[in-house]
Image (tube, rainbow, N blue to C red):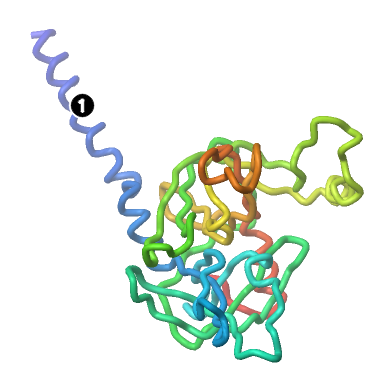
């Protein structure tokens, strides 16, 4: 009798464990499928360029569906008034994405953030709150790591938040600390250090919680261990992201609704 009860209880436990992912959260594939339609390419239209539609980074849709968040450095190069140039957003997937003309409506150079606005409405993500995410939180990153060589096909990477750290790349010796690095240390501007593989094209990609898809940060740089030319061949596996609290603050300063 004891053995039968033990086997029965063990069977119940086994069955309940099988259903835990469905009861307490979504699978990673479901989370990615939910977020991916909100991931867009950010670039430049240049009527006189050798390539008229240039993809320069990644972004994501938030708020009312017309707002795009990305890194300031993705769009920091000024438009040439002597040419027909303007910022653009690529949506959809495949070899023929939809192109949207975009306007910069908010900038935050210090936190490497910018908000663009388009005329269309696209699916938007949900932003997490302003509290920092805990270390070891499992995260996902979706973007365009090598641009759009074969078309617009977003790729997803998986990792964890390794630490919340000052916005400086560590130097081997104190003599290598620049004045700008020291200012950032004094300013206590904290960012996420990630144990995740990313590439330059991922700049502006949403960093989101693997359990619910809420955006926790915006990828803004990759630690290059050798040279920029070898970053694709030998990625360091260390990346950094701006906490989403700074995007929320920027949006609120401009009177924009974030969720």
From the viewer's perspective, tell me whether residue 144 is left or right of residue 178: left
Residue that numbered label 1 is attached to: 14
Q: Residue at x 47, y 83 (%)?
A: 100
Nearest the camera: 52 or 124?
52
Asked if residue 79 is positioned above or below residue 224 in the image, the reply reads below
Q: Quadrant of residue 10?
A: top left
Q: Quadrant of residue 249?
A: bottom right
Q: Position of residue 73 (x, y in %)?
A: 68, 65
Q: Position of residue 221 (x, y in %)?
A: 64, 51
Nearest the camera: 148 or 170?
148
Nearest the camera: 123 or 148?
148
Q: Residue at x 60, y 45 (%)?
A: 239
From the viewer's perspective, tell me whether residue 254 is left or right of residue 30: right
- Looking at the rendered structure, the number of numbered marks drawn on it comes to 1
Q: Residues within 10 Å of mark 1 (few under 14, many from 20)?
A: few
Quadrant of the rendering where the N terminus is positioned: top left
Q: Position of residue 167 (x, y in %)?
A: 75, 48
Classify mark 1: helix, strand or loop: helix
């Amino acid at each position: 009798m004891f053995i039968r009860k033990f086997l029965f209880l063990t069977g119940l436990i086994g069955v309940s464990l099988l259903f835990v992912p469905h009861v307490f959260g979504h699978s990673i594939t479901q989370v990615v499928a939910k977020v991916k339609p909100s991931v867009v390419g950010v670039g430049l239209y240049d009527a006189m360029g050798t390539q008229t539609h240039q993809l320069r980074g990644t972004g994501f849709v938030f708020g009312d569906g017309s707002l795009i968040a990305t890194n300031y450095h993705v769009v920091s190069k000024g438009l040439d008034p002597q040419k027909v140039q303007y910022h653009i957003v690529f949506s959809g997937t495949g070899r023929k994405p939809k192109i949207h003309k975009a306007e910069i409506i908010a900038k935050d150079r210090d936190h490497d953030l910018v908000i663009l606005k388009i005329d269309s409405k696209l699916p938007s993500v949900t932003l997490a709150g302003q509290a920092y995410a805990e270390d070891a939180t499992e995260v996902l990153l979706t973007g365009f790591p090598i641009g759009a060589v074969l078309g617009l096909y977003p790729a997803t990477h998986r990792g964890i938040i390794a630490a919340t750290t000052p916005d400086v790349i560590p130097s081997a010796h104190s003599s290598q600390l620049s004045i700008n690095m020291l200012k950032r240390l004094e300013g206590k501007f904290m960012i996420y250090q990630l144990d995740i593989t990313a590439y330059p094209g991922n700049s502006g990609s949403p960093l989101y919680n693997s359990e619910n898809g809420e955006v926790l940060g915006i990828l803004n740089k990759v630690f290059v261990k050798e040279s920029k030319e070898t970053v694709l061949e030998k990625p360091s596996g260390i990346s950094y992201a701006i906490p989403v609290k700074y995007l929320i603050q920027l949006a609120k300063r401009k009177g924009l609704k974030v969720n």
